[in-house]
Image (cartoon, rainbow, N blue to C red):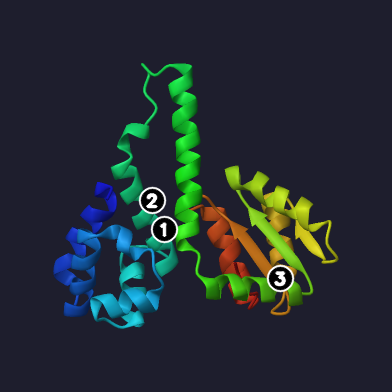
Amino acid sequence: MEIKIQARINQLYPQLGSSSQRLADYLLKQPIAAAVSVNKLAAACQVSPATISRFARTLGFKDFSQLKWALIHQAKQTVNGSSEVKSADSPQQVAQKVLQANTDTLAQTFELLQPTDLTRAVKLIVHAQKIGFFGMGGSNIVAQDAYHKFLRVPLTVLYDSEYHLALMQASRLTKNDCAVLISHTGNNRDTLLLADVLKKQQVPLM
């Protein structure tokens, strides 16, 4: 695990309750074990799902899903530390490492997928009056690609690459619509602001 999260947990450890400390001990020993649903993790640590949610927020994450992604991503980085591109690498080695990094990201994303989440996402998309795709920075092109693909199906879709126009679109969506937010890190400030606006509008998020 990258020292950043480990140090954060250790720093806050004395302030945590007994249940949160038990969860912290579990994740420090085996961070990759976070790649399960919140209920399964709660059962494994003998804590409540609410304890896990509070623990994630205490560490500065929006929710458990964001913490789970960070734990898995950093654990894989530690294991695959040799994938870091170095100045002495040949063009072939650089290409191989870039390919491996992208393959690892896809594999990590797949590990986070839960059947119930996929079923919920399908229902939201099929029954939504409008679907908004949002992505800032490097994720913008991914949102645009998704928008382009969904233009081929009989659904009403929205997308804009400019943040303020995207913000206006987000403010016009309702609980009868749905929004797809795309972020590589989960920490993009503009994306989080869009998420806050969508939540206030009671728009289902994916």
Q: Position of residue 200 (x, y in %)?
A: 60, 75
Q: Is residue 157 above or below residue 85?
A: below
- The three-letter code of the residue at mark 3 reads Ile
Q: Give me the residue at 69% from left, 71% from top.
A: 178
Q: Position of residue 17 (x, y in %)?
A: 19, 78
Secondary structure of the residue carrying numbered label 1: helix
Disc 2 crowd rating (10 Å Cα; few below 14, some 14-19, many 20+) is many
Disc 3 crowd rating (10 Å Cα; few below 14, some 14-19, many 20+) is some
- The three-letter code of the residue at mark 1 reads Trp
Residue at the disc numbered 1: 69
Do the CB atoms of the residues marked 2 and 1 lie less than 8 Å apart?
yes
Q: Is residue 166 above or below residue 200?
A: above
Residue at the disc numbered 2: 73
Secondary structure of the residue carrying numbered label 2: helix
Task: Say which of 124 and 162 sits in front.
Answer: 124
Q: CA distance from mark 2 to mark 1?
A: 6 Å
Residue 161 appears in the figure:
no
Q: Which mark is residue 125?
A: 3
- The three-letter code of the residue at mark 2 reads His
